[in-house]
Amino acid sequence: MWHHGETITVLRPVGTSTRHPGDGVTEVPHTIDNVVINWAGTSEVNDRGEVVVSDVVLYLPSGSDIRSIDRVKLPDGDRYHVVGKPSPWRSPWTGRRPGIEVKLKGVKGA
């Protein structure tokens, strides 16, 4: 689909936590190839130091196995949470629906 897509690792939670989401939950990984990664980031400073909030949008091939409960490990090793529901995306130029759009958010330094 893309000539220079990247590989991501999807981390799917298995089991449940009674205290906090993600607390004591095992994650089962699987990879998705040929992904376009669009990085955007902001940073804020608070009284404890710098906090970096990163927003990322992924464009995945149609049929990719990703859900709103998943986390994603990008090629640089950073992990992000899926925000909202992964959804098909449509080209505004052709109307073609070549894949799935997924929004991610990551927070570091908090």
Image: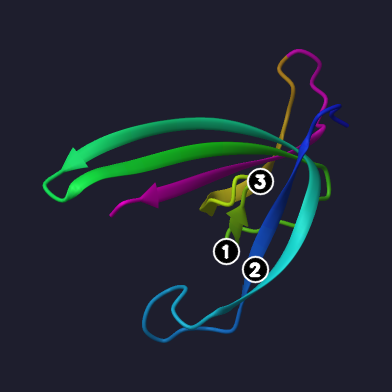
The secondary element bearing badge 1 is classed as loop
The answer to whether the residue labelled 1 contacts the one labelled 3, judged by CB atoms less than 8 Å apart, is: no
Local packing at callout 3 (Cα closer than 10 Å; few below 14, some 14-19, many 20+) is: few
Report x, y in % for residue 46. Answer: 16, 44
- Position of the N terminus, as image quadrant, is top right
Residue 75 numbered mark, or none: 3
Task: Give, as a single range, the part of the protein colored magenta.
Answer: 93-110
Report x, y in % for residue 49. Answer: 19, 46
Q: Which quadrant holds residue 89?
A: top right
Reading the image, the residue beneath label 2 is 12
Q: Indicate whether 48 appears above or below 26.
A: above
Question: For the residues carrying marks 2 and 3, which lies nearer the camera in this image?
Answer: 3
What is the three-letter code of the residue carrying label 2?
A: Arg
Report x, y in % for residue 87. Answer: 67, 44
What is the three-letter code of the residue carrying label 3?
A: Pro
What is the three-letter code of the residue carrying label 1?
A: Ile
Side of 83 relative to 29 (left or right): left
Reading the image, the residue beneath label 1 is 69
The answer to whether the residue labelled 2 contacts the one labelled 1, judged by CB atoms less than 8 Å apart, is: yes
Q: Indicate whether 32 appears above or below 30.
A: above
The secondary element bearing badge 2 is classed as strand
